[in-house]
Amino acid sequence: MRIVVCEFMSLDGVVQAPGGPQEDTDGGFAHGGWSHPFFDPEVMGGAFDEALGKADALLFGRRTWQTMAAAWPGRAGDPFADRMNAIPKYVVSRTLGDDELTWENTSLVPGDGAVARVRELRDGEGGDLLIMGSPTLVRTLLHEGMVDELRLMIEPVLLGGGKRIFPEDGVLRTLELVSTVTSGTGVHVSTYRPRAAE
């Protein structure tokens, strides 16, 4: 499987709480819902549709999974929602119990063995393992060299601070720009893959 990360991102690299005011207020973050003014159903929505269409499973951190689990089951009847609800899902958590996995087709990946378990999934057969949001998990997987593609929706807004996905470990990582398209709202939807070592 390929691990594909799909993120809404501000121009200054913040991915925290793009969807709503109470989505993630850690660190006093006060700009929740910042991505809404820039959402373009054709370009950005199309990028998510394409990513989900190629995915054989979804992978989340706990907070993102809880946000999604509270939203998507109630949207049945929409093709995107139906796919989100039907597809296998994995949630990495040190605190969730199996009895809390109320979203259909969700399996728990215990936090202590998460990297090894995700590596097993990645080494298995199948299409893409898609991650949306989940900045802590994405940062860990980038650090481990396990992300095969980044699909970033870089929006023309500066948030001045918040959660980011990129490791701050001093390691140089070179990427290749695979594709880019600009929405009418000024969002660059850019796809990157790690450049093979020469």
Image: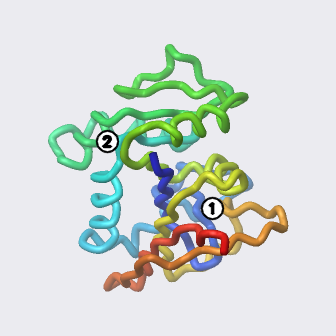
Q: Residue at x 41, y 36 (%)?
A: 70
Q: Earlier in the sequence, mark 2 or mark 1?
A: 1
- Image quarter of residue 189: bottom left
Quick check: 87 left or right of 193? left
Q: Residue at x 57, y 49 (%)?
A: 134
Against 153, residue 182 (above or below) is: below
Real-space CA distance between mark 2 and mark 1, rounded to the nearest whole angstrom: 28 Å
Quadrant of the drawing holding the N terminus: top left
Quick check: 102 left or right of 43? right
Q: Return the x and y of residue 161 as percentages of the image width and height.
A: 71, 68
Q: Return the x and y of residue 30 as percentages of the image width and height.
A: 62, 61
- Image quarter of residue 126: top left
Q: Which residue is the extreme one toward the top? A: 99
Which numbered circle lies on residue 84? Answer: 2
Q: Return the x and y of residue 101 as percentages of the image width and height.
A: 47, 23
Against 75, residue 54 (above or below) is: below
Q: Which residue is mark 1?
A: 30
Q: Residue at x 50, y 57 (%)?
A: 5
Observer-nearest of 182 and 15: 182
Q: In front: mark 2 or mark 1?
A: 2
Against 73, residue 37 (above or below) is: below
Q: Secondary structure at mark 2?
A: helix
Q: How many callouts does the rendering have?
A: 2
Task: Identify which amino acid the numbered label 1 is placed on.
Answer: Ala
